[in-house]
Image (cartoon, rainbow, N blue to C red):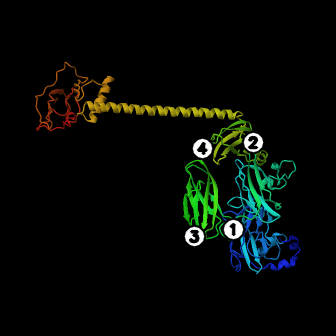
Amino acid sequence: MTDLNKLQTIPVQNTTIWVLAGERYPRPFGVDNGAPGDEKDFAIVLETLPVRGADQVVRLQEDGKLMFDLSKSKGSILEYRIDRNVFKDSDGNGVANDDIDNANDDSYLLGSPWVTYYSNDELNGLVAQVTLVSDTGETLVEQVPIETGTVKQIGNPVALLDILPYPHQQNQTVYLTSTPRTVGFYAGRSTGAIVEYRIDRNIFEDSDGDGDPTNDIDNLNDISFTNGDVWSTDYAETDDQIIAQLIVVGQDGKATLVQRELVFADGPDLLTTSEADTVIRLEADKPMVQVGDPVLFTVKGLQQSLEQYLFEWDFNGDDQIDLETEAVNTTLHIYDQPGVFDAKVTIRDREGNFALKSFEVTSKEVQPLSAYFESDINDLRVSFTDQSAAPENAVLSYLWSFGETDEAQYESQKTALYEQNPTYEYATPGTYRVTLTVTDDQGQSDTYSTELVVGEVLAAPTENTPNSTETDSQANASSSFFKRLLKGLLYFFLGGFILIFLILSTVVLAFKIKHSDLTFGEVIDELKHKVESLFGMHEPYEAGHQPDPEPQQPLDHESESDPKPTKPEQAVESSDDSAAWVGNRDVIEGEVVEKPDRGSNGELNGSGHDTTSNSNSPSEDNKGPVPDWLKGV
């Protein structure tokens, strides 16, 4: 075993010979510098905590820590250089990307874990860089993009624990190969409204000396206890069982835990030598789905081209192959039954090596979840009562938004955001939109929102109308009444008009059916006369017959005893055989109607005789004007 004391006595000036001062590294991620030769003999194997995502980006908490571990890198390596920020010149030599920020740490010579801290103002387009220098002077470079990340901070707590060195993907055991061994823990990916992240480095070890090894909180005095950031501890080699534990506690006292076993031994290899230390894993886009929803499975962390692999998929964990894909590391599957399924995939390469990966998927029946609340307003103080509907036995978490804009008021009452039935006091009267989001322990959520008028909101009274508010209220009520009245009358008359129209249409149609030989115009005339007769305005007559013309009444100056002037009856031909005149009488369908005498200008004389002509007939000898009563005959 290497003597650390001897390594630490090496003069600094001797080690700085290997620093390639002044060189720049404009390389993309993962591209090596120089000719490293066989990658199996000289390769960077970098593990970080927090773990890099699928896009190879490390996402830190604000003001967070980052742990680097290069101890699994391959080759005869003299230096493990770490530049925590390639855009910052930390050594002051004028070149930003040649810094060795771990030069005074054991990790510089051993590749062992090294922790650095990033403040918020640094986390903007940040890139770290690791460089390996071999005993032949060859170098390998890898860059690590770093960003800030956020996690879900509502709902029930769900514990997630990342460990460095990485757990073996097949059995989730952490293998420790050197002693003393520094191990890092990161609970920052845990979700839910969490107030405590309790880490017990070994549940079989009573570190606080109270006689109960299961209640230790070994990170109690570290910032990781409150935010889940990186926390590290050293383990001495032992044959005893070591189980580390994380307990996350929610605001309502609910808690969940996760455990990991640590063993001092060499872990089993994965596929090939070059892949033995990579993170090959099976992932799903949704660990919890509703029955009938598709799940996308993906194998990640492969180092060779996809053409080198065969994938055997077992979606329900019954050790029966459901699907085989070649050179395709993704597939979709739909679970049509509820349950918890241990999906597995066996990965084989062309050399006969294989690895088995698994991922647990929970399929749930569709359950209703409906958020709702009621409120009791007492001036500025409002009491809210949750009335949400949820599946039976569901565990709910609550997130309120009270619409408050007063920062001081909000800060003093922000703990009410996660209560089921909170009471909130507003700073000023007004209208506020209140929103409740309810989430169950299966990940389903629903939101209800409404506006509340809080406090006494009155319009300022004018000088001449001290009771202007009451007057305005009465005026508004009166205006509203007349509007409703006018609307009611409009509807009444409109309905009456439509009813009358329907009745008249029905009567006309019935009359038309009864007298089919009449036109609609004649039908209407007949009905008109019937109506007039009904009101005494006209003598009734049978449909289809015109009424007899009224007899000519004598003029005022004439009496019934006065003799009528006689004229010789003289027939006059007419274009209409049904009508002719004789003297000053009309003959209409065999009946004789007396006509008054008119002059040539159409005027009556004093005795009812024509004053302009002695001729009483339109003969050939006397062609005077045609009387008005003969026009059209």
Residue under label 3, please give it: 307
Q: Earlier in the sequence, mark 4 or mark 1?
A: 1
Q: Earlier in the sequence, mark 2 or mark 3?
A: 3
Which dot, 2 or 3, sits closer to the camera?
3
Residue at image location 59% in from the left, 47% down from the top: 338
Residue at image location 12% in from the left, 34% down from the top: 572
Residue 148, quarter of picture = bottom right
**Residue 39 visible within the image:** yes
Q: Compute the Cα span from label 3 to label 4.
A: 42 Å
Picture coordinates of residue 205, whole percent (x, y): 83, 53
| Type of amino acid at the residue the image marks with label 1 | Ala
| Type of amino acid at the residue the image marks with label 3 | Glu
Residue 558, compared with residue 613, is above or below; it is above
Residue 421, quarter of picture = top right
| Type of amino acid at the residue the image marks with label 2 | Tyr
Residue under label 1, please give it: 276
Q: Secondary structure at mark 1?
A: loop
Picture coordinates of residue 401, whole percent (x, y): 70, 46
Residue under label 2, please give it: 426
Is 625 situated left or right of 480 in this image?
left
Residue under label 4, please give it: 367
Picture coordinates of residue 576, whole percent (x, y): 15, 36
Q: Earlier in the sequence, mark 3 or mark 4?
A: 3
Q: Are marks 3 and 4 in contact (CB under 8 Å)?
A: no
